[in-house]
């Protein structure tokens, strides 16, 4: 009986829910809540739902409501494909929020053919070249630029200034770097070529790469293999769980290197998992951390409580803020496309390409896109963990430092 | 073999025919007609789901051959699909081979590569074989393809093919419908080839090895040679699956051929039925279809219960595992056996015997 009542209530709500708004804009979202990247994917999904709710509460897309189709694909590429096609043909969305590198890049030729803008959480540099991926957009700086920025900041702020290295500098030693990442995973191996190139540029010696799986719990053998090289710096290219394991093992075995971490391995969980070993670890964040004092953050906190009251704020992470940046960027493009009277795939793409120094707040450096360059910008904030908190070390502007390379050989890899 | 009253064979050929009555022939004509006309009335989404089903069938055929017909347990089948896919992509991109030629090269390469990892099967069985086939997965995908193959031509870890590069004798395979026809033609061909192969001396030898390898050896079956032949045939089938993966995505990356896909395929044949060819088709339709149907259940309801998409999702993951467990408990012979039972029921209907 109770089940029947619940069913009736559902039907009634469905019928009522569809009548409240005159028009709606459909938005698809592919997420991983159950697969190998769900450690960050869950928080992302919560954030997307909250951000869409916020957009709808503040007038929607010029008075049209966003209808969100959020779906989990468990990081399985075939399922990502069928889900994307469902969004395209069945739900008829105008844009898609994407997730992983493997599936985003796999779908890239298809979305180009379908002319359906795809704003992904994967920031692989390949996705930022409109010649090869015309309908792909990213809201954060690509992995290769991130890696270059982190290395640059470490050299400028640590190697050149820290008394620990005074002796080595006086002897004219080159700094030594070693890289820990999962070889077969596109996300992890995407920036490696750029890292090696940048190491050459800054005068590093590069040690042998160490393969650490995304689900590694024990990385002692890799750390010991790297230890013989006596590195000053270690790059971590995985997601939080395995980065934490590596940093802990490095700490326990006395690797003696500083750490820099790519953005999907650098969040509040790293501090929780690695504990004291995380002290001083530097990394990339594409926007502010959860609860930082930046514009619009109070809304993020408010909607977190409102939409998902069951999740305590201390369990929330920077990933929520990233979702907000992603959704607000999509909403902004939709608003512009709608004002131009072209709220469809190609219109949305053109709207994205009109972004000039646009920022939603939330500590995201301004985003500029053009028809010939889909890199969101050249300014990258680098953070450091101090007493369990994240503090901004420096914002690097790669374009200002290396204008020739930024527009030339660095484009799209 | 069930034959209705009044149907009897007068030649050996007729008694060995695949379809022995007009009713069955009619069913098969209908099935082929259905497959051939599906894109005419289905929308693109349905066609793309059908493509994934066909790709799953092609992938699982080799697993069915090894596990279901030859008794060689394999978990590394995704590796050979990867070999086929990469060889096809590279053949088309770097060496300018026409797609059919590149696909053929990919199939042969995958077959030979599969034999390499089949070699230990001369000495070992069961659990140890699981280890060697898993080793195939790691050595092939995580090591060779990721490190060496993917770096060919100064690319990164994956290839994307410009649209329009895949042509068959001047016919560009550039839309989902065309991929569907390509995949369904290859699926029907592979199915027919394997079905006929299993009725020959070779197939009988495989089944003998599966049922009791010592007895098979005593009867004069060259166990090692036939095992390696099974690995070769499975590798070729995997190569065909890999060759189909390329035009449907125009893209190939090591992430598409992980160990999980190999495990998934074993799940497919467990659900479909071990040792049955149409079990492969049933299993593929079942696992792909269930995931799609769950979308139809979850997405509309999530407007009302947003928690569905976040907290209720483990149900989808659990569905697959639960399906396998329930099948092993209640349908140990899979969907194929249930299909058989259904047909039998109607053969005798309305009488019970």
Image (cartoon, coloured by chain):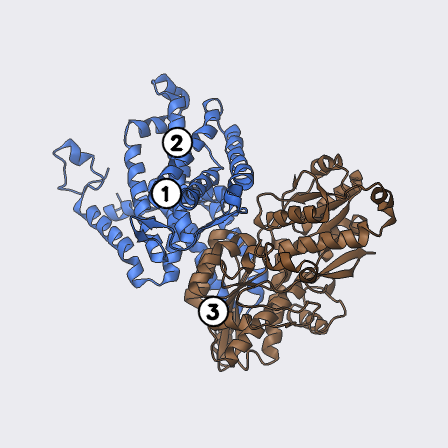
Res A285 quadrant in image: bottom right
Q: Can you give x and y, in whole percent of width and height, for residue A196 in the image?
A: 65, 46
Nearer to us of marks 3 and 1 is 1
Q: Is residue A219 left or right of residue B37?
A: right
Which disc, if any, is residue A188?
none
B262 versus A381 height, above or below: above
- Mark 2, residues whose alpha carbon is within 10 Å: few (<14), some, or many (≥20)? many
Q: In this view, does A408 lie to the left or right of B182?
A: right
Chain hosting mark 1? B
Q: Is residue B4 left or right of residue A406?
A: left
Dot 3 and dot 1 within a common chain = no
**Dot 3: what SS?**
loop
Chain hosting mark 3? A
Q: Mark 2 points at which residue?
A: B232
- 3D distance between C-alphas at marks 3 and 1: 38 Å
Q: Mark 1 points at which residue?
A: B97
């Amino acid at each position: 009986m109770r089940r029947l009542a619940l069913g009736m209530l559902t039907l009634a709500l469905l019928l009522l829910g569809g009548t409240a708004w005159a028009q709606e804009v459909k938005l698809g979202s592919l997420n991983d809540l159950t697969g190998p990247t769900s450690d960050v994917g869950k928080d992302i999904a919560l954030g997307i739902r909250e951000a869409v709710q916020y957009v709808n509460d503040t007038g929607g897309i010029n008075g049209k409501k966003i209808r969100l189709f959020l779906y989990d694909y468990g990081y399985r590429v075939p399922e990502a494909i069928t889900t994307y096609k469902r969004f395209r043909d069945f739900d008829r969305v105008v844009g898609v929020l994407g997730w992983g590198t493997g599936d985003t890049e796999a779908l890239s030729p298809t979305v180009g053919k379908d002319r359906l803008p795809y704003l992904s959480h994967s920031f692989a540099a390949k996705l930022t070249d409109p010649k090869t991926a015309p309908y792909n957009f990213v809201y954060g700086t690509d992995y290769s630029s991130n890696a270059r920025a982190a290395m640059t900041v470490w050299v400028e702020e640590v190697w050149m200034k820290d008394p620990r290295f005074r002796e080595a500098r006086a002897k004219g030693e080159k700094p030594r770097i070693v890289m820990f990442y999962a070889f077969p995973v596109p996300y992890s191996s995407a920036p490696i070529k750029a890292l090696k190139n940048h190491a050459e540029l800054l005068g590093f010696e590069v040690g042998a790469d160490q393969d650490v799986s995304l689900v590694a719990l024990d990385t002692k053998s890799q750390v010991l293999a790297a230890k013989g090289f006596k590195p000053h710096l270690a790059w971590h290219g995985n997601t939080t769980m395995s980065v934490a394991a590596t940093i802990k093992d490095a700490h326990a075995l006395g690797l003696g290197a500083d750490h820099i971490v790519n953005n999907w391995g650098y969040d509040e969980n790293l501090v929780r998992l690695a504990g004291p070993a995380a002290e001083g670890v530097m990394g990339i964040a594409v926007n502010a951390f959860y609860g930082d004092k930046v514009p619009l953050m109070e809304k993020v906190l408010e909607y977190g409580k409102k939409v998902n009251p069951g999740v305590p704020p201390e369990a929330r992470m920077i990933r929520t803020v990233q979702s907000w940046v992603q959704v607000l960027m999509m909403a902004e493009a939709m608003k512009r496309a709608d004002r131009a009277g072209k709220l469809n795939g190609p219109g949305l793409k053109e709207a994205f390409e009109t972004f000039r120094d646009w920022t939603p707040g939330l500590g995201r450096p301004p985003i500029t896109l053009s028809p010939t360059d889909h890199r969101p910008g050249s300014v990258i904030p680098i953070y450091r963990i101090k007493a369990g908190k994240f503090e901004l070390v420096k914002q690097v502007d790669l374009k200002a430092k290396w204008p020739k390379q930024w527009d030339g050989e660095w484009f799209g890899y | 073999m069930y034959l209705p009253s009044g149907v009897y064979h007068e030649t050996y050929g007729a008694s060995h025919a695949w379809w022995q009555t007009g009713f069955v022939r009619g069913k098969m004509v209908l099935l082929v007609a259905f497959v051939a006309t599906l894109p005419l009335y289905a929308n693109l989404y349905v066609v793309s789901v059908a493509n994934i089903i066909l790709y799953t069938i092609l992938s699982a055929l080799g697993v069915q051959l090894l596990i279901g017909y030859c008794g060689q347990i394999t978990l590394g089948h995704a590796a050979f699909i990867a070999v086929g896919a990469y060889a096809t992509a590279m053949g088309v991109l770097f060496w300018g081979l026409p797609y059919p030629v590149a696909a053929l090269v990919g199939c042969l390469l995958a077959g030979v590569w599969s034999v390499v990892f089949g070699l230990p099967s001369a000495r070992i069985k069961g659990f140890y074989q699981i280890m060697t086939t898993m080793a195939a997965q790691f050595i092939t995908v995580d090591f060779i393809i990721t490190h060496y193959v993917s770096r060919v031509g100064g690319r990164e870890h994956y290839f994307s093919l410009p649209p329009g590069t895949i042509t068959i004798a001047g016919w560009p395979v550039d839309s989902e419908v065309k991929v569907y026809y390509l995949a369904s033609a290859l699926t029907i061909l592979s199915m027919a080839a394997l079905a006929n192969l299993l009725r020959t001396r070779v197939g009988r030898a495989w089944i003998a090895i599966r049922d009791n390898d010592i007895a098979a050896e005593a009867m004069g079956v060259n166990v090692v040679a036939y095992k390696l032949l099974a690995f070769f045939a499975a590798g070729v089938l995997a190569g065909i699956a890999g060759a189909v993966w390329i035009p449907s995505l125009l893209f190939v990356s090591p992430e598409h051929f992980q160990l999980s896909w190999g495990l998934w395929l074993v799940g497919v044949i467990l659900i479909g039925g071990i040792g049955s060819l149409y079990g492969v088709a049933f299993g593929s339709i079942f696992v792909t279809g269930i995931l799609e149907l769950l979308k139809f259940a979850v997405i509309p309801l999530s407007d009302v219960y947003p928690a569905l998409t976040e907290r209720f999702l483990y149900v989808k993951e659990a569905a697959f595992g639960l399906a396998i467990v329930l099948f092993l408990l209640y349908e140990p012979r899979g969907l194929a056996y249930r299909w058989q039972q259904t047909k039998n029921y109607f053969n005798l209907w309305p009488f019970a015997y």
